[in-house]
Image: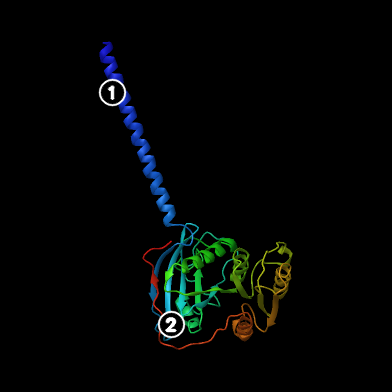
Amino acid sequence: MREGTRRVATALAAAVILLGASFGASARISGSLGSLVRSTRRDGLLASLTAVDVPEYGIPGVSVYSLKYWSRGVLVQGYLDVPSGKGPFPLLVLLHGGWLYAEPYHHDNYAGPLWASDSPVTASQWASYKAIVFLPNYAGYGPSDGTVQTLGPNASDALNGMAALRQICGLRIKAHATYLLGESMGGGVAVYLAERDQHLRGAVLFSPALFNSPTWATQAYDVHLPILIIAGTQDTTVLPEIAQWTAQILSVRDKHVQLVFVGGGHVPLAAGWGTMLSWYARHGLTLVQSLSTRAPRIGMCDARP
């Protein structure tokens, strides 16, 4: 009986060891798969790049693309237009407006003043300028996944999109020549972005929305960047006094902040267009139209970092 008991105990011990080894292997496999999923969704990783045809508005020599990339675990989409020539070109990032606070829904067909009717059309209209133009859709807008977020997460989505651009083969972005153009809530995104990227050269903010009331303007922003604020004298969304408060707050850390009032209401692009172009030119970004028919070839790299 004792010998039989020993055999049974030995068998049971072996089973326990095998079972433990199996669980350990499963845990290791599960952990490896989790690490793999996280690595394929890391911030700023380019996921896809496809050409977009905009025949009604297309400009010879200009290519418009849609790209998708990962940001905060969400697949975010943006539009990119690439001018003719070899480059390198300065980068202009267009930051559209929207909701100032997070909302539990997705907005499929957002169209703001910087977006004539939809994003590809707007991209093609900007693409005649000798600059690479990037229009990120934050999470919760347009073709991006996720739900509407507030300024900080939106800035992360834009920043991760800028990182994804640098993984595109054949896209030649000029070093230390990135500029921002933000409208309404996108102007607030530009301020948050400027706090986190010290290599930006300048930003133009149309009717920037950092807060809804001057009495809420208590936060200090660590921004050291030339900024032009263009506001409408008849703006009932971002009131003129809010624009003045915004300029005053941003001037605390950097005196290169200019406020210009023009006729018009919210985001007065037409009235402020010439002022914007002149300001960009003084700060190193000359937006010159080009109708060359030799657009560069870009595409996904075989091996991405």
Q: Quadrant of the N terminus?
A: top left
Percent x, y of residue 30: 38, 44
Q: Quadrant of residue 205?
A: bottom right
Query: Which residue sits furthest top?
Result: 1
Q: Is residue 216 left or right of residue 28?
A: right
Residue at position x 48%, y 81% from top?
127
Determine which of the numbered discs, if any, sits on residue 62 in the image.
2
Residue at position x 61%, y 74% from top?
201
Residue designated by label 1: 11
Percent x, y of residue 207: 64, 75
Answer above or below: position of 14 versus 245: above
Q: Secondary structure at mark 1?
A: helix
Determine which of the numbered discs, if any, sits on residue 133 in the image.
none
Residues 245 and 127: in front is 127
Q: Label 1 is placed on what type of residue? A: Ala
Residue at position x 34%, y 29% from top?
17
Percent x, y of residue 59: 43, 85
Contact flag, marks 1 and 2 (Cβ < 8 Å): no
Percent x, y of residue 301: 38, 67
Answer above or below: position of 121 versus 45: below
Q: CA distance from mark 1 to mark 2?
A: 73 Å
